[in-house]
Image: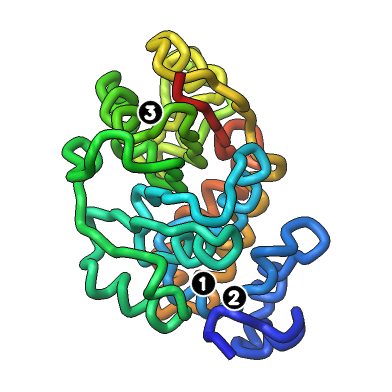
Amino acid sequence: MSAVSAVSAVTAVSAVTAVTAVTDLVRPERLPRSSRYDPAWLLGLDMGPHPLWLLEDLAQDLDLRPGMRILDLGTGKGATSVFLAREYGARVVAADWWIAPEEAAAVFAEAGVGDRVEAVRAEAHALPFEDESFDAIVSIDAFEYFGTSDTCLPCLTRLLRPGGQLGIATAAMTREVRDLGAVPPHIRRAVGREAIAWHTPDRWRFQWEVTELVRVTSARLQRDAWRDWLLWSRACAEHLPDGRKSHQPVIDMLTEDGGAFLSFALVTARKN
């Protein structure tokens, strides 16, 4: 059996017994595809909020089909690329700037998708791919780091075939920082100025549609995003080495926020 699979929810959780928060990471009633993956495996690839919850939710607004060539932009250690290959039968190019391709390739080989996922090192503003070479581009918990530039969307749409799809799940605010006048103190203490780039779905919709390069097909806040993020952060704090030190500021931020400002934006579009 693959390291990413679990016979049942109980089996998945057994890999990390005595870690109470990890039991909350198996949610078959809401996220059945993600619940087939061992929480311990996912925690070992931690680079941010539960990537498969975000991707599975986002995929409801996309039309992903077997054989598609998908660019997973900002894949991190590769969990989302494994998911795209296994769950949707896609051929995936897993691109990241910070993670060595060899490290990601090892994850793909262990998950049994090494023949369907290619790991590459690429910077989002200088992507080394041919025009119209992808059916879809997906970015999970990464777009806020490079996608706010007005020049980003043209760089991405040139890679999409006519009618190709773009989907992002990105940290968001329920109101624009510009409208608030400042980053709220409890958020600033945890992430500093980073939250300035956490835009609302409406802001993303306008920024994309004004270019006339794409037609936005959905733009929404993820339901209970702050709670999902908090569950993940608590599991990381309990399970990972030094997890409490690295995740406690985020736990404190989310607990104080209570969903007032923090969320995730899920945005999809088709190339015109």
Name the kind of residue labelled 3 in the image. Answer: Ile
Q: Position of residue 86 (x, y in %)?
A: 55, 67
**Which residue is denoted by mark 2 in the rendering?**
39
- The local secondary structure at tag 1 comes to helix
**Which residue is denoted by mark 3 in the rendering?**
196
Q: Dot 3, crowdedness within 10 Å: few (<14), some or many (≥20)?
A: some
Name the kind of residue labelled 1 in the image. Answer: Leu
- The local secondary structure at tag 2 comes to helix
Name the kind of residue labelled 2 in the image. Answer: Pro
Residue drawn at point x = 29 percent, y = 54 percent: 95
Q: How many marks?
A: 3
Label 1 to label 3: alpha-carbon separation: 28 Å
**Viewer-proximal residue among 225 and 35:** 35
Q: Is residue 108 shown to the viewer in this render? A: yes
Q: Dot 2, crowdedness within 10 Å: few (<14), some or many (≥20)?
A: many
- The local secondary structure at tag 3 comes to helix
Q: Are marks 1 and 3 in contact (CB under 8 Å)?
A: no
Question: Going from the N terminus, do you reach mark 1 or mark 3 first?
Answer: 1
Relative height, residue 17 to residue 109 (above, below):
below
Drawn side of residue 65 relative to residue 178, left or right: right
Q: Are marks 2 and 1 in contact (CB under 8 Å)?
A: yes
Relative height, residue 151 to residue 247 (above, below):
above
Relative height, residue 12 to residue 69 (above, below):
below
Quarter location, residue 38: bottom right
Q: Are marks 2 and 3 in contact (CB under 8 Å)?
A: no
**Which residue is denoted by mark 1 in the rendering?**
42
Q: Position of residue 142 (x, y in %)?
A: 38, 45
